[in-house]
């Protein structure tokens, strides 16, 4: 509730936000690059893609769908808690992790069948819930689940146990360095007129660095080489591009209203932002130098993932309830 109130306040201030002026972006028709539209359950929200790109997982209200990318067809479904707030696939592709708004239990589903899941109890406050996005370590041993009640839970996937690391910000998303030595958290302090990325030590929880980004950051992603971080900022609405070695944001690009989805191409050349309220998919250069295209979408887009070869982008939408598949080569006229 605190974050929602903050978001609404910042939205009213969006017109006053200062951002870097980008070169004009091309605008493509809604059908540009569409390969397929896969109908799934009501209100698809979060997406995750297997490391080999063979399966896209889509969470809807109370259901998880496994979509085979070779056929763009649903191959398996499972019942999950409604109102999913976190979804991830382990690096070996063997398990799908999910968490819901009112739950303090991390669900671990076998990727092949989505049947017979196991669970990991997460630390609770007075009431369950508050958990959100999930980040999995590159070695597959641990998962990090943010909680807006000023902490992050570190779950050991081998022992099925979890511990709490207290924070001084309300985290909305997490990402891990490839060597596993740094956990990056994006969130808000106080009223969040300026958003924050904190880099913490995964063992001690000590803060190593604090970086400023746009207001009310909602999603966080790292470039494949680990040199940059990206946040989508609800209070902009903007995309912040951060040089992690330099410790500062190097670009702030305009994106659609309510940017709830974020993905980086495997080569780091492009960043994709799905914006729910404006019904757009924005494609920007990975170095933050330009917005390449803004693609209008049908319905309300929520999340986006990109295939390991960079040739496909998958966007979840409601009204209609579907996962829309794009040929990324047809989304940008020229670069």
Image (spheres, grey):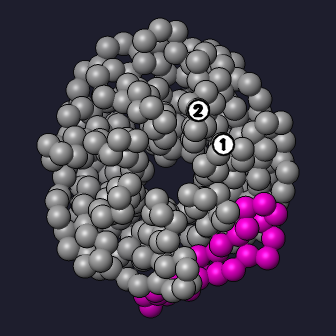
* Residue at image mark 2: 309
Q: Nearer the viewer, residue 316 or 119?
A: 119
Q: Residues within 10 Å of mark 1 (few under 14, many from 20)?
A: some
Residue 291, percent from left and from top:
38, 22
Give the residue displayed 69% in from the left and 52% down from the top.
57
Of 274 and 66, the residue lying toward us: 66
Please determine whether, in this image, residue 130 is positioned above or below residue 182. below
Instruction: Determine which of the numbered discs, if any, sits on residue 53 in the image.
Output: 1
- Say whether residue 24 is visible: yes
Instruction: State the separation of the CA atoms marked 1 and 2.
Output: 8 Å
Q: Secondary structure at mark 1?
A: loop
Find out whether residue 303 is within the magenta segment: no
**In the image, 61: left or right of 16?**
right
Q: What is the quadrant of the C terminus in the image?
A: top left
Contact check, label 1 and label 2, Cβ < 8 Å: yes
Label annotation for residue 291:
none
What's drawn in magenta, residue-wise?
104-127
Nearer the observer, 225 or 237:
225
Secondary structure at badge 2 equals: loop
Q: Residue 303 appears at what percent x and percent y? A: 57, 45
Q: Earlier in the sequence, mark 1 or mark 2?
A: 1
List x then y, in percent, for residue 104. Answer: 55, 81
Residue visible at 71% across and 56% down?
60
| Coordinates of residue 186 in the picture (x, y in percent) | 32, 57
Residue at image location 30% in from the left, 28% down from the top = 288
Residue 194 in view (yes/no): no
């Amino acid at each position: 509730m605190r974050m929602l109130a903050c978001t609404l306040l910042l939205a009213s201030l969006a017109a006053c936000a200062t951002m870097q002026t980008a070169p004009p972006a091309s605008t493509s028709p809604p059908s540009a690059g569409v390969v397929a539209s896969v109908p799934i359950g009501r209100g698809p929200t979060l997406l995750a893609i297997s490391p080999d790109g063979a399966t896209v997982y889509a969470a809807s209200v109370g259901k998880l769908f496994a979509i085979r990318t070779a056929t763009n067809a649903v191959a398996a479904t499972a019942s999950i808690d409604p109102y999913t707030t976190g979804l991830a696939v382990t690096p070996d592709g063997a398990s799908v992790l999910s968490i819901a708004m009112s739950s303090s239990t991390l669900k671990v589903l076998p990727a092949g069948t989505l049947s017979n899941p196991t669970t990991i109890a997460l630390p609770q406050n007075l009431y369950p819930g508050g958990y959100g996005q999930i980040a999995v370590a590159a070695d597959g041993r641990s998962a990090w689940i943010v909680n807006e009640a000023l902490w992050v839970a570190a779950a050991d996937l081998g022992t099925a146990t979890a511990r709490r690391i207290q924070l001084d910000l309300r985290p909305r998303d997490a990402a891990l360095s490839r060597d596993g030595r740094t956990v990056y958290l994006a969130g808000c302090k106080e009223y969040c007129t300026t958003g924050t990325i904190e880099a913490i030590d995964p063992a001690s929880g000590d803060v190593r660095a604090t970086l400023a980004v746009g207001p009310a950051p909602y999603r966080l992603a790292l470039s494949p080489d680990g040199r940059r971080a990206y946040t989508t900022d609800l209070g902009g609405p903007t995309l912040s591009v951060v040089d992690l070695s330099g410790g500062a944001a190097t670009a702030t690009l305009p994106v659609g209203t309510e940017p709830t989805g974020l993905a980086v191409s495997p080569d780091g050349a492009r960043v994709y932002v799905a914006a729910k309220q404006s019904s757009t998919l924005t494609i920007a250069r990975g170095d933050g130098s330009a917005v390449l295209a803004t693609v209008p979408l049908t319905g309300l887009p929520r999340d986006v993932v990109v295939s390991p070869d960079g040739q496909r982008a998958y966007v979840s939408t409601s009204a209609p309830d579907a996962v829309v598949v794009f040929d990324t080569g047809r989304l940008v006229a020229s670069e």
